[in-house]
Image (cartoon, rainbow, N blue to C red):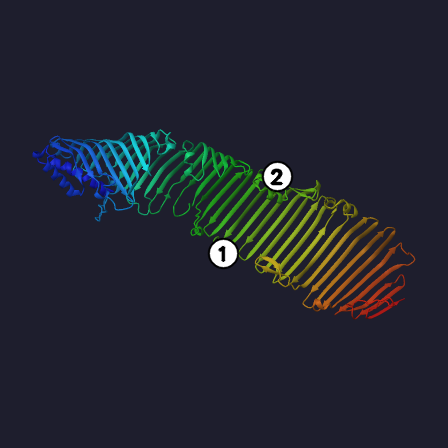
Amino acid sequence: MTRRLVKIAVPVILLVLFALLAPLLLLHSLDFGPVRALVLSLVRDATGLDVDYTHASISTTGLVLEGLRVRQPEVCRGYAENLLAIDRIEVAFNLDELRLEPRRVAKINARGLRATYIDVQEGPPCFPKSSAPEAESPPLSRILELQGPGLDLGGLGLEDIAIQRLVVKGGKVVQSESLAGLSLAGAARMAQGELAAELQVAGHPLRAELTEDGRPHMAELDFRTTLKVLDPHHVEATATLAGLRQDLLPDLAAFRDVLDLVAKVELSPRDGVVRVKFEKFSALDQAASLSAQVAVADNPGAGPLAVVQGLLATLQLDRLPLRSLAQFLPVPFLDLLDVQVSVTADEVGIGGASGLLTSGAIKTSLKAGHIGIEHDGKRFELDGLALDASVPGLSNKSPPSAGTVSLSFDRLAPGDTIAEVRRAQADLSFEDLSLRPDSLPHSTGRARLLVKALGVELSMKLDKGAEDALSFDISGAATRLAPLLPYLPAATRRAIPVDLARMGVRFESSGHVSKLLDPDRSIRFNSHLRATGVSSALKDRRLDLAAIDLTGRGILSADSVHLAVTTVAMRPTLANKPLADRVAISGDGHVTKNAAKVSVTVNAAGPKGPLLDLAADLHQRAGTLGFKVDLKTGDLSGLASSLLPRRWRTRVGWDGLRLGLSAAGDLAGVLSMRGFVPALAHRPSPRGAQHVELEVKGVRYRASGVEVEAPHVTARLNAKEGPDTRSLDLALTHEDARLAVGGTRVRLLDSAHEVHVRSEGPPEEGRFAAELTSTISQLEKNLVPQYPVGDLKIGVRARVDRGAFRLDALNIENIKGGTKLELLAAMDEAGVTAQASDHSPISVPGRQALAAW
C-alpha cells in the first residue's frame, strides 16, 4: 500500500520540482508541445505511470497545474480510467524564501481531487508486487521525527476530495465504495527535526456510497476532525461525526451525534511507547462512551502490544435499535428499558505474544430496568437485573485464575412453562485458583459462591492447598420449600411421599479431598441435614415429624468406602397421636472390594421411657456373612394405639407386652462382592451356624371367646449348615400359660418344649432325623376334671432314610394320671401310595407296634 501511494505522489512531486527548477526561459511554456512531451516522457520513465495535464505554468511567485491525470495501469484501465485526477493545483512561494532554511512555501491549494483504488481479489493485480525489500519503517514513537531539509508550509487547502474503492472478482466490479465532499486545511513547519502542524479534515456534508450486487446505498454525514502536532512528541486530535440522512443502516438514521472524540497523543522514544489519552469519546447520541489511556509499544517482545489504563466504557443498550438488529443476534430483543453496560479496568494488555493480559482488574457491569426477549414463540422477561463481574487477570491462553461475579434481579418470567421468580441473587468469587488441569495440582486459592432464590439460600466455599488437596464447605437453608414446587414436574411431585409445601430444610457439609487429580484420591466429609415440618400421608392417616436431623461423616477412596450416618426424628405423630418423643437411627458402614461391615442402631423413647432399642451388626468377608442382632422393647401401647387397626388395638394387651431378641451367626457360600456391592453368589451353597433367642413377656390376647395369656415365654434356636450335615435345635419354655376357648380353660405351668432335627448327606437323598420332647409340670383344666394331668412328658423320635420312615419312639407319660403310652412304627416304602379296596383295609408296607398301660 505504501509503494502504491509513493507511485501516485511521485509524478506530482516531479512535476512540481521540474517546474521549480526549469529555466526561466521555459516559464509559461510547459504547455508548448515539445516541452510538454519532454515533461510527460520524463515522468513516465521515472514512475512507469501514464501522466497527463491540460495546463501548467510557473513563475517567481508560484506554480499552477490544471487537469492533472494519472491513469490506471493498463491491466486495470477497464475498471476505471484514472488512478488520480486533480482539477487544479496552486502553489504560492517566494524564490528568495525557497533558498532559506527552512524553505518556506506560502500555500498549496488544490481542488477537484479524485482517487480510485482497485482491489483485485481474483486475477492479476493492478500493481505487481515488487521484489525489492521495503525500507525499514521507523519505530512508532519516532514517526514524527522527520529528517531532511526544513519546510515551512504557511497554508494547505484541498477542496472537493473524493476517494473510491472498487472490488473486482472474476473480471467484474462486484462492489463500489466511495467518499465524497472531503476538504482539508492546515499548516506545517519542520526545522532541525522538529515538526509542528495543524490539520483539519471536514465534510459538510460527507457523502458515503456503497453499491453491492447492483443495489446502491448512501449516507450523508457532517464530519470534522482536527489534528494538532505540537511537537514530534505531542499530538492533539478531535473528531465529530453527525448523521444527516442515510439508508446504509436505516436503524441508525435517528442518531444525530454519531461520534464525538477528543484525544491526546504522547510519543516517547525514550520509553519506546506511544500513549493515547481519550479525554472524550461518545457515540450514537452518547449511548456509548469511553475514556481511557492506551500505550502502544514499539517492540512489545513477550509482553502485550498495547496497554489500556483507566478504562471506563459504557453502553446504553435501550437507546440502540436492537429490534431491527435482532437478525444479527442469537435471540431477538423485543423491548428494553434503562439497560446499561459498563466496563472498567485499571490496566489491560491487548495483543502481542502473550495474548490478552491484565495487571489490574477488569470490571463489567450490566444494569437493566426491563428486558424482553422472544424465542421459539416464548416470551422471556427480566426486571431489575444487576450483573457485576471483576477479573484481575485475563489471557486468551488460559482461563482466569481470579474474579468475582454478582447477579441479582427483581423478577424473572421465563414464559408459560414455569412460574416466575421473584428477587434472586448469586455471588461468586475465586482467588489464586487456576482452572487449567495442568496447573491445578500446584495452585493454591479459594472460591466462594452464594445463591439466594425462591426462599433458598445456598453457600459454597472451596480452598485449594498446594499439596494437591481441596477443602470444601457447603451449606443451604430454606424456611419453606413451597416456593420451589411450581418448578418441579408434576410427576416428580406425585412421586415424592412428603408434603414439600410445609417442609423446611437446612444442611451443612464440609470435607477434604486429597490427591485431587490422582485416581487414588480420597474424600473425607462431615454433613448435617435438618428438615422441619415433615409430613407424609400413610393411607388415610398423616404422619408428622416436628424435625429430622441427619448427620453423616465418611471417607471415600478408590479401594474403600466408610460411612457413618445418624438420623434423629423428633416427636413423630400419626393422625395427631404421638408415636414417640424421640427416634434415633445410626449406621456405620465400611466397605472394601473384598469385605463389608455395617452396624445399625435404632433407639426410640416415649414419655414412659424407652420404646425400642435395636443393635445390628453385619459383616461380609471371603463370601461369609456374619450377623448379630439385639432387640429390646418397652411399653408399646402408644405405638399400637396409633399404628394398628382398632381390632388389634383391643384384642392385644400392649401395655404389658415386652419383647427381647438376640441373634448371632454366620452364613457362607451365599453372598459375594461385586466391587463395593454385595451380590447373591452364582451357585449358593449355604454353610455356617446361627443362634437366636426370643423372650416375650406380658402376652394377653382376647377375641371371639378366645383368651390367651403368657406372662413369660422364651425361645431359643440353633442352626448349623455344613457341606454334608445340617442341624436345627429349637427350645421353648414358659412359666405360666393360660388358654380359654368358650367355657373350656387350660393352664400350663413350668412347660418346656424342644425340637432337634439332623440331616446328613445331600438334601436330595432325604436322610434326616427329628426328636421332640415336651414337659409340663402341671396342667389345670375344667375339662374332664376327674383325670388329673401333671408331670406330663411327651417324646418323639423319628428318622427318614432314602424313602424309609422310622418312628423310633412316641412316648407319652402322665405321672399324676398314671398313664404311659409307647408307639413304634416303620415304613420301608414310605413313598408308595397306600392301597385300599372294598373288602380289605388300607395297608402300608412296614412294621407297627403299639403298647399302652
Residue farthest toward the right in the current orientation of the protein: 786
The answer to whether residue 664 is left or right of residue 84 is right
In depth, the one of 757 and 131 nearer the eye is: 131
The answer to whether residue 135 is left or right of residue 782 is left
Q: Position of residue 166 (x, y in %)?
A: 28, 39
Q: Nearer the viewer, mark 1 or mark 2?
A: 2
Q: Quadrant of residue 606?
A: top right
Q: Position of residue 491 (x, y in %)?
A: 60, 44
- Check disc 2 and report the residue beneath it: 501
Distance CA(mark 1)–CA(mark 2): 42 Å
The kind of residue on which mark 2 rests is Ala
Q: Which mark is residue 626?
A: none
Q: How many marks?
A: 2
Asked whether residue 480 is in view, the answer is no
- Up/down of 792 relative to 702, above or below: below
Asked whether residue 312 is in view, the answer is yes
Q: Secondary structure at mark 2?
A: helix
In depth, the one of 690 and 156 nearer the eye is: 156
- Up/down of 205 relative to 526, above or below: above
In depth, the one of 5 and 264 nearer the eye is: 5
How many other residues sit within 10 Å of disc 1, few (<14), some (14-19) or many (≥20)?
A: few
Q: Are marks 1 and 2 in contact (CB under 8 Å)?
A: no
Q: Position of residue 284 (x, y in %)?
A: 37, 31
Residue in the image at 7% along x and 34% along y: 25
